[in-house]
Image (cartoon, helix red, strand yellow):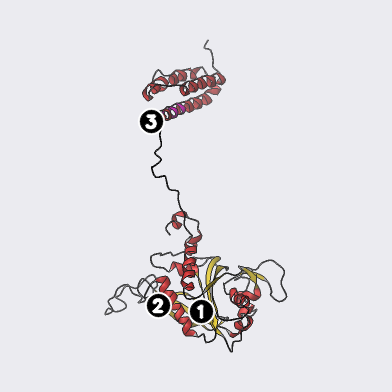
């Protein structure tokens, strides 16, 4: 009768083979393969006794043999590498440089915007992202019935209401910084503020995110007029988008400015023409329209002369002082730069390193 072998006995035999290999010295890779994995090697000799293992243990025994074979192959390879490994280090050889990250593209844009306005005397500011209703709406000449104050447009904080300042909200724009800046300077001119911060609205699509960044410009002094605003817009357009870029203003309506304006910048791809070719003699039907802007212009945001009621809320006499303000989304402004071609601003906050490493 054939003597049966238990799983425990098989484990001992496998352990002995492993220990023996680990103690080997002086044998070449070829010799080790013959001794342990050859036709008459230790592995094949051990594999022959699997027939002596109980039927119910054969599956486990087969798995153990497969693991042993993998161990033998890997260990022999490692031993060969150890023999060929260089035993000295050249300290003069350059090291492997660590990966260096960079600022997020939106942070890069905010830095560039800050530098542009600092060159013409603006001071960088930043105000609350969670603020009272009074600063976000009431002080900006927005009545309680204004659609922007609707709960479907604004994130309201579940907190006690102040009798004077109202509810607490996530700021829907950086304009809450206008009256706060006037208060900080004790209602004394001149004011030249560039306020950059986060804003929150209940919108989410290819051109909107529920959290985004805005930069707000505010200038207040005696004799400020719309020509000063237009000159500032032209200056920023050329500094941010390149020489030759122009700004265009169109009548609009905002509660906190009067008059109010929409601001467009000329397209950098078609040079503001709306067409990709320069053959003016062709009819418009024959020319290739610019698919990026479709009209020669890009809408970037709003602007206007500060409303007298906003000046009063900040402690200024509108009969003596005037001012202008403008506010645009940082992401929107940045994605219109030449060569970016970002058609969905949500990509900026996707966390996709393949996307972010391009900037």
Q: CA distance from mark 2 to mark 1?
A: 16 Å
Viewer can see residue 117: yes
Residue at 66 percent of width and 67 percent of height: 157
- Against 101, residue 49 (above or below) is above
Q: Earlier in the sequence, mark 1 or mark 3?
A: 3
Q: Residue lying furthest front in this view?
A: 92
Mark 1 lies on residue: 303
Question: Residue 246 got which mark?
Answer: 2
- Against 94, residue 233 (above or below) is below
Label 3: how many residues lie within 10 Å, few (<14), some (14-19) or many (20+)? Answer: few
Q: Earlier in the sequence, mark 2 or mark 3?
A: 3
Label 2: how many residues lie within 10 Å, few (<14), some (14-19) or many (20+)? Answer: many
| Numbered disc 1: secondary structure | strand
Residue at 39 percent of width and 45 percent of height: 94
Q: Are marks 2 and 1 in contact (CB under 8 Å)?
A: no
Residue at 44 percent of width and 67 percent of height: 335
Q: CA distance from mark 2 to mark 3?
A: 67 Å
Q: Nearer the viewer, residue 262 or 343?
A: 262
Viewer can see residue 298: no
Mark 3 lies on residue: 84
The residue mark sitting in front, 1 or 3, is: 3
């Amino acid at each position: 009768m054939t003597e049966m072998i238990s799983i425990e006995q098989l484990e001992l035999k496998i352990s002995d083979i492993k220990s023996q290999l680990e103690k080997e010295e002086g044998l070449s890779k070829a010799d080790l393969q013959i001794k342990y994995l050859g036709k008459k090697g230790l592995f094949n000799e051990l594999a022959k006794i699997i027939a002596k293992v109980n039927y119910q243990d054969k599956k486990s025994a087969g798995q153990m043999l497969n693991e042993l074979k993998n161990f033998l192959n890997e260990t022999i390879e490692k031993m060969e590498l150890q023999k060929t490994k260089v035993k000295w280090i050249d300290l003069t050889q350059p090291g492997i440089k660590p990966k260096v990250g960079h600022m997020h593209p939106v942070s890069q844009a905010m830095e560039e915007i800050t530098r542009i306005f600092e060159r013409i005397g603006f001071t960088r500011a930043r105000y609350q992202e969670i603020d009272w209703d009074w600063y976000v709406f009431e002080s900006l000449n927005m009545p309680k019935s204004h659609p922007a104050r609707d709960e479907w447009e604004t994130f309201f904080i579940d907190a006690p209401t102040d009798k004077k300042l109202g509810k607490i909200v996530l700021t829907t724009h950086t304009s809450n910084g206008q009256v706060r800046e006037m208060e900080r300077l004790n209602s004394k001119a001149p004011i030249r503020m560039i306020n950059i911060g986060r804003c929150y609205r209940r919108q989410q699509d290819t051109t909107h995110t529920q959290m985004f960044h805005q930069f707000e410009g505010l200038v207040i002094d005696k004799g400020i007029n719309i020509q000063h605003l237009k000159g500032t817009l032209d200056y920023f357009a050329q500094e941010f988008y390149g020489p030759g870029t122009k700004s265009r203003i169109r009548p609009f309506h905002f509660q906190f400015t009067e008059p109010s304006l929409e601001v467009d910048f000329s397209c950098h791809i078609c040079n503001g023409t709306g067409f990709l070719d320069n053959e003016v003699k062709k009819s418009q039907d024959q020319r290739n329209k610019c698919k990026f802007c479709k009209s020669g212009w890009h809408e970037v945001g709003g602007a206007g002369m500060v409303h007298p009621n906003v000046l009063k809320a900040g402690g200024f006499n509108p009969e003596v002082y005037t001012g202008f303000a403008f506010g645009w989304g940082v992401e929107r402004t940045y994605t219109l730069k030449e060569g970016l071609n970002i058609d969905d601003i949500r990509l900026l906050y996707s966390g996709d390193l393949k996307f972010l490493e391009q900037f």
